[in-house]
Image: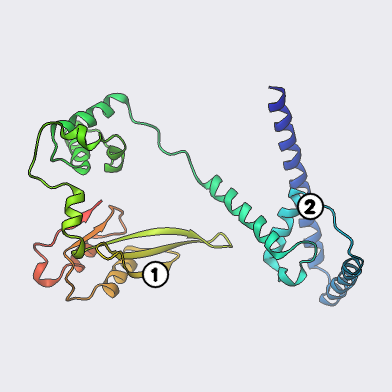
Amino acid sequence: MLRFFQNTKRSLDSLLILITDLVADGLLFFRLLFRSRTALSAEVLFLRKQLAFYEERQVQPRRLDDSARFSLILWSRLCNWKEALVIVKPETLIGWHRKGFQLFWKGKSQAGRPRIPENIRKLIVQMAKENPTWGQARVAAELSVKLGICVSPRTVRAYWPPEPERRGRRTTSSQNWKTFVRNHAQSIVACDFLVVVTARFRTLYVFLLMEVGTRRIVHCNVTAHPTAAWTLQQLREAIPSDHSYRFLIHDRDSIFSAEVDHCTRPREHQRRTPIVKD
């Protein structure tokens, strides 16, 4: 317990020092904004001459603390830091930036949704065992329509029983998902979005379209503001009108509108080509 309080006190002290240094640096920055460009250029040259003297004498600087590292990362976004960096290597500053990037994602990540009640979990397992031809989407639909229990297929998947346990001694002629993909891999394409964050913490969305049989990326593009119309245009550019694909796999996000399912079907297969939604 004593160690816990000591660690907490040390963390609060570090946070207080960081905030104090940032406020002081911010006030100094705003004060420098009102100085003339000539005076600032002369002061920069004056400071660089002093740093050159220390470099010539090979004087080692003191180890930087967390507040100094954070300040350098913050102010490096406003200038050409590669030319002004002296006390550490560029790889070191990039490593500090990468550590801040990890902290950004750690704060953005969450623990996830709470578990559903135990009686609903048991009901999902029971429905899966008693209906071996049903999929996760069918179980979710039955719970929603007949019992008023609104759960998504992805939630049902989290409590789905293992395949041998679900099948038991019963046999069925319906092929499972693995068999379906293996039999029709050459005529299946799958599309989805992935999220990337740039060095300036700007969120971008990458659209990918892949052939399942060859694992070849058919098309990819990047946008900061994805819409259903933009997604539809990407599919039109990637898939020709005389394509031989029979199945398109995508999730149930609203960005994949009904027009997406319609435009990806060739004219001679518009009535019989299914669209598989995960």
**199 or 61, which lies in front?**
61
Which secondary structure lies at badge 2?
Answer: loop
Inspect this view and state whether residue 272 appears: yes
- 159 sits left or right of 84 in the view: left
Q: Residue at x 83, y 70 (%)?
A: 35
Q: Nearer the viewer, residue 154 or 216?
A: 216
x 17%, y 60%: residue: 184
Estimate the x, y position of residue 262 in percent, counting from the top left.
18, 65
User: Where in the figure is residue 2, as x and y percent of width and height?
Assistant: 72, 23
Classify 85 as above or below 107: below
| Residue 33 percent across, percent down from the top left | 78, 67
**Colouring scheme, one of rainbow, by chain, secondary structure, one colour:** rainbow
Question: In terms of secondary structure, where does tag 1 sit?
Answer: strand
The image quarter in which residue 101 lies: bottom right
In the rendered image, which residue does mark 1 sit on?
A: 221
- Based on the displayed image, in which of its 4 quarters is residue 61 positioned? bottom right
Q: Amino acid at mark 2?
A: Leu
For disc 2, the neighbor class at 10 Å (few under 14, some 14 to 19, many from 20) is: few
Q: At which x and y percent is residue 31?
A: 81, 62
Q: Amino acid at mark 1?
A: Asn
Answer few, some or many: residues within 10 Å of disc 1's Cα (few below 14, many 20 plus, some between 14 and 19).
few
Instruction: Report whether residue 128 is seen.
Output: no
- Report the front residue among 266 and 257: 266
Question: Label 2 belongs to which residue?
Answer: 64
Q: Earlier in the sequence, mark 2 or mark 1?
A: 2
Quarter of the rendering occupied by the N terminus: top right
